[in-house]
Amino acid sequence: MANQEDSVQLENFEEEAILLILKGNTLGAIEELEKAMAIEKHWYHLYVKASWLHSLPEENIDEISSIIQEGFSRFPDQLFWFLYIRTDLRHFEAVRLAAANLQNLEVSLSQLLEAQKDINLAIYELQERPQIIKVTLDNPPELFSLVFHGKEMNEVFKKVNDTKLEIISVHQTISMAKYVFDTENRINIRIDKQEVLMQSEKMRTIEILGFFTAIIAFIILIGNVAFKTTYNEAMPILGGLSLVLILFVTVASLVTSKFYRYRDILKDVRSWLAFLLIIILSFLVWFSQREQQNPNAPSTNGIQSQAVEVLDKEEMN
C-alpha cells in the first residue's frame, strides 16, 4: 500500500491526467497516468489507459490487449469492465478491417464472434455479481469518468444489451457482404475461364481459316506457275511461296494468342519456327538477287534451248 506522501502524489498525477485529457492531450494524459501507476496500480488505471490508447489513431491493439490481460489476472473482481472494453476493442477492429479491405471479411467475422463471447460473459458478470459493479457505480474513482460514470445498474444493463444487439447486427451485415463478395469472386472466376475458352476458340478459328486460305492460294499459284514455267524454275518459286504461307499462318496464330508477358512469346515453339522461316526466306531472296547480278551464269532456260537447237541440227542432217 502507498503511504500518505505517495497517496498525495498519486492524486496529483491522476488530476493532471484528467486535466490533460480534457484539453485533448491524450499522450500527455497517458504519461501522467503511468506516473500514477508507478506509485500504485489500481484496476481503473488499467481500464482508463486501455480506453485512452483505444482513442488514439495509431495501432495499439497489442498493447491494449496486454493491458486487458493484466486486468483479468490481477483484478478478477473487476472482470466486467475489462470484458466490456475488450468487446468494444474487438468490435471496432472488426469494423475497421472490413472497411479497409474486403479480403479481411473472414478475420472481421472472427473478431465479431469473439466480441459476442465477451459481451455474453459481461452480461453474466452483471447478473451474477451485480453488487460489486453497483459499488463501483455508486462511488466511482475520480479518474473513472468514462462511459459508465454516473449511471445506474439498469442503464448499464441497457447499454450492454444495446452493444450486444449492435454486434449481432454488424455480424449479419458483414456476413452478407462476405456472401456477396464470395459470389462475385466465383462469378469472376467463371467469366475468366469463359474468356480463356473464347480466346482459345477464336485462335483456333483464325488458324483454321488462315490454313485453308493458304491452301487455296497455294493451289491457285501452283496452277499459274505450272502453265508459265518449267519444272525446275517452278520448284524454287513454289518452295518460297510455301514458306511465306507457313510463316503467315504461324505469325497469325502467335498474334491471336494471349501472353501475359512479352518474354513468354520467346518460350513458344511457333516463335522459333517463324524466326527460322524468316532466315530461310532471307537466304532465298539473297540467292535470287545474286543470280540476277550474275547474268553470265548458265540458266536452266539457256541449257534447255541449247539442247533443243542441237536436236534440231541433228534432225536436219
Image (cartoon, grey):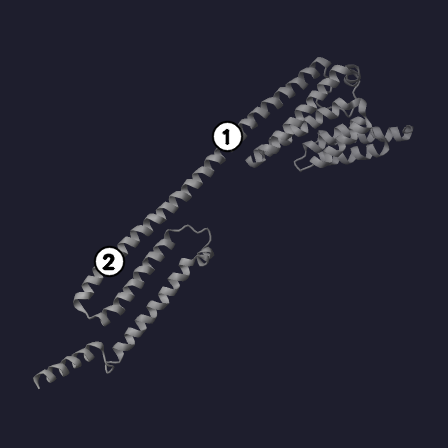
> How far apart, in angstroms, are the residues tagged by discs 2 and 1?
54 Å
Q: Secondary structure at mark 1?
A: helix
Q: Is residue 271 left or right of residue 248?
A: right
Callout 2 crowding tier (Cα within 10 Å): few <14, some 14–19, many ≥20: some
The mark found on residue 226 in the picture is none
Figure quadrant of residue 146? top right
Whole-percent x and y of residue 87?
68, 26
Q: Earlier in the sequence, mark 2 or mark 1?
A: 1
The mark found on residue 180 in the picture is 1
Q: Residue at x 66, y 24 (%)?
A: 116
Amino acid on which disc 1 is placed: Val
**Which residue is outermost to the right?**
3
Q: Residue at x 59, y 33 (%)?
A: 106
Amino acid on which disc 2 is placed: Ala
Which mark lies nearer to you, 2 or 1? 2
Q: Is residue 18 visible?
A: no
Q: Quadrant of the N terminus?
A: top right
Q: Secondary structure at mark 2?
A: helix
**Which residue is outermost to the bottom?**
317
The mark found on residue 217 in the picture is 2
Q: Is residue 211 visible?
A: yes
Callout 2–callout 1 Cβ contact below 8 Å: no
Whole-percent x and y of residue 284?
31, 71
Q: Residue at x 30, y 71 (%)?
A: 285
Q: Nearer the viewer, residue 85 or 40?
A: 85
